[in-house]
Image (cartoon, coloured by chain):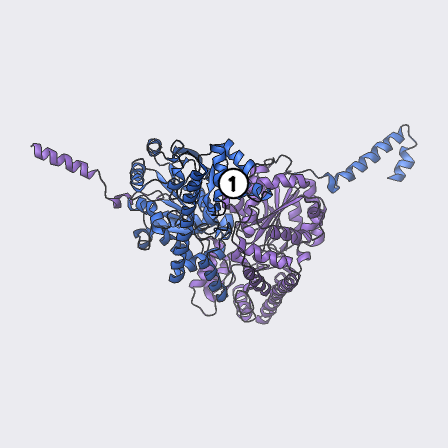
Chain colours: A blue, B purple
Amino acid sequence: LANVIADFIMPCEAGWLFSVIYCLYLLLDVSISLPDCFSSWWSEVQMGPPDPILGVSEAYKRDTNPKKINLGVGAYRDDQGKPYVLSCVRKAEAQIAAKKLDKEYLAIGGLGDFTKACAKLALGDDNEVIKSGRNITVQTISGTGSLRIGANFLSRFHTEARDVYLPKPSWGNHTPIFRDAGMQLKAYTYYDPKTCGFDFQGALNDISKIPEKSVIMLHACAHNPTGVDPRPEQWKEIADLVKKRNLLVFFDMAYQGFASGDIDRDAWAVRYFIEQGHNIVLSQSFAKNMGLYGERVGGFTVVCKDAEEAKRVESQLKILIRPIYSNPPMNGARIAATILNTPDLYKEWLGEVHGMANRIITMRELLVANLKKEGSTRNWKHVIDQIGMFCFTGLKPEQVERLTKEFSVYMTKDGRISMAGVTSGNVGYLAQGIHAVTK
Amino acid sequence: NHKTLETSWLAFLASDVHPPHDWSSISWWSEVQMGPPDPILGVSEAYKRDTNPKKINLGVGAYRDDQGKPYVLSCVRKAEAQIAAKKLDKEYLAIGGLGDFTKACAKLALGDDNEVIKSGRNITVQTISGTGSLRIGANFLSRFHTEARDVYLPKPSWGNHTPIFRDAGMQLKAYTYYDPKTCGFDFQGALNDISKIPEKSVIMLHACAHNPTGVDPRPEQWKEIADLVKKRNLLVFFDMAYQGFASGDIDRDAWAVRYFIEQGHNIVLSQSFAKNMGLYGERVGGFTVVCKDAEEAKRVESQLKILIRPIYSNPPMNGARIAATILNTPDLYKEWLGEVHGMANRIITMRELLVANLKKEGSTRNWKHVIDQIGMFCFTGLKPEQVERLTKEFSVYMTKDGRISMAGVTSGNVGYLAQGIHAVTK
């Protein structure tokens, strides 16, 4: 090229100009292939907002105030404010380790010893559904994974209706779970801010207008975030109305045992609906009641018309699950199965769940007592009436903000506090703060 | 008359109260069809039912030792003991997983000193093994790579790739890859097809030990592919499920991934620790997006978290703790490299033994590809009818496409296997 330029182009008029332009062209062509100039695939990707619930914990970690309290995430804490690994879990782990089991893939639907026990826990050992084999229960990635499998299944197979009705309010993550699965979100009245309790008439009114075959989400016990549960006679009326409206019931049971301290009592609504002939779908989590949080243990159940239908549904659940994660994680399921299937451990577990629920109840009573001691004249009865991990304090966003900024008490903006984060050591300070922002 | 009317009216009212059992006849799922069993996992199920004592399972790609038993790595047992002794809690991991794991995971793939990691321009999240990683990737592409909907898979590819991308909302296409005439790589065919892929489409590349064929491009071929892909301006999605397992050497198996990045491709990458650490059921994997810079990586990270949270909230801890312990503890890391090398070597030895035995049986077919192919699988070249005979007459279980898992071959069964293969191919 240099020779061509020298011999033929340079001698021409403006040949120098041509050479300069051509050299620039060559340089540009080379530089375009340099890594620096690679265009970005993700320039249009916006920074997303942080998760509202998990974001609270992150803000808490950054705070240097020694009196800070984290009432954000619903993870149980003991009275020293420490994470609590259940004794029955440690024992189960030791048993499992001693067996030197392999790490071969579980089936797509998970560990059989786990799924069977999981269904029995929810429905009762002698439930007719289990005896007739008309349920299919698959192991899932805790409660979220269960809800998402359910949402995906409904989206694919419940084609008569696209709408899922959530209680108002519901767990924040319910919305993106169903939305990303392709369902539409609607709501029915649930919480009454005037009483900090259940708006029973409001719920019935709204439910009576839900179009037939829509999906209705019900929290089996320990409603998240309000802690407000229907009473048994109210559940009966809801079951009746839902039957009349011919709605598909989706139960979310993330707190079995954790609400009242009693496994069977907390599953009462689920079992009642099934008895009444509702062929429900059900999500279960073992994150809280077995403290297995990060092990991700859960179950998804479809109660079918009969065993034949259960087989068809099972085949389709597997086809759905395989391209999401192939098969579920083994460790937590082995722990849960060991506990549920070993009488001594099962008994110990029931005691520990009861203990956790009791500590929560005690903290509720202590908080109200301390608020009164502070001189608060507000009605705090709901703190004791509400049940489970959470308490909907009734605090407004501005009050929550003050509580965080001035007292380093961390909670979600909706006024929800995790009672599990309250200890005999911090309940006095918490009462101070709450009284200060509400007097 | 009045009484009769009243009785009838009461009877009418009573009949409106259906006994509970009537309602179980109302079905939400009557239109749900029985689906076909998974082709790969279905093979194992058929194998289990077979009573022939000589049966061999060459279906699923799970490593077996020379006794045909599952193999839990020694470094894994040690890591487990270390972890158990610490009495750690079970608190939720972050949405993106265990930091000690994700950092080490990225370093393993890209190399400790990779400029990408130093400049913080990758985001690596912990996933539910390889499948979970691919699905997160597919969902991410579906949501954010709006310029193109098409994903180009090699022909053939792992069966599960198709539903993963389809269920995530992408469209599947293919490029020539395997040459059935040579049981090798159709390099020209691949280049021809790739040269026609529309700009900005996603191209899936198997980093090493192609599944199901075991056929990998040579380095000089990878260079041409990288160049062509650059010219076509394609988004590269690397699936690396067998790092260490292919050649026995971690860095050698990651060569293509690192070369592409060096050449300026901002790739997305799925990694699995199911095979190379034997962590199958613990579900350990990683998904990486190589971004333009650290700022972009932060934006991408925030969106990955928003995507993951409504799928499973946060990933399972146990396997990630094991993998992190191994990757971050020099002694265990060294032991692991040795064990991976050992597994890969046993596979290579079985390949050689199988060919030797086939020759001993008197087979005159060219079985060179069995030794040339690499990794867990071997694409024998057997036709479906031959596979069927092999299963029915010899109780040798494999997938219909003629793929065998070399990991299922042992010095104890390789002779019988050669007999069967020779019988159906002579």
Residue found at the very far top of the displayed protein: A13
User: Residue A156: in sight, yes or no?
Assistant: no
Q: Quadrant of the N terminus of chain B?
A: top left
- Count all numbered tags in the image, as a single digit: 1
Left/right placement of residue A219 relative to residue B122 reads: left
Kind of element beneath mark 1: helix
Instruction: Report the amino acid beneath label 1.
Output: Ile
User: Residue B194: in sight, yes or no?
Assistant: yes
Left/right placement of residue B134 relative to residue A371 reads: right
Q: Quadrant of the C terminus of chain B?
A: bottom right
Residue B224 position in % (x across, y down): 71, 48
**What residue is shown with label 1?**
A53
Residue found at the very far left of the displayed protein: B1
Q: Nearer the viewer, residue B46 or A153?
A: A153
Quarter holding residue B23:
top left
Give the crowd class for mark 1: few <14, some 14-19, many >=20 residues within 10 Å: some
Residue B118 position in % (x across, y down): 71, 47
Q: Nearer the viewer, residue B63 or A234?
A: A234
Q: Is residue A176 above or below residue B73?
A: above
Q: Is residue B42 above or below residue A438?
A: below
Residue A404 position in % (x across, y down): 54, 37
Give the chain of mark 1: A
Residue B108 position in % (x across, y down): 65, 54
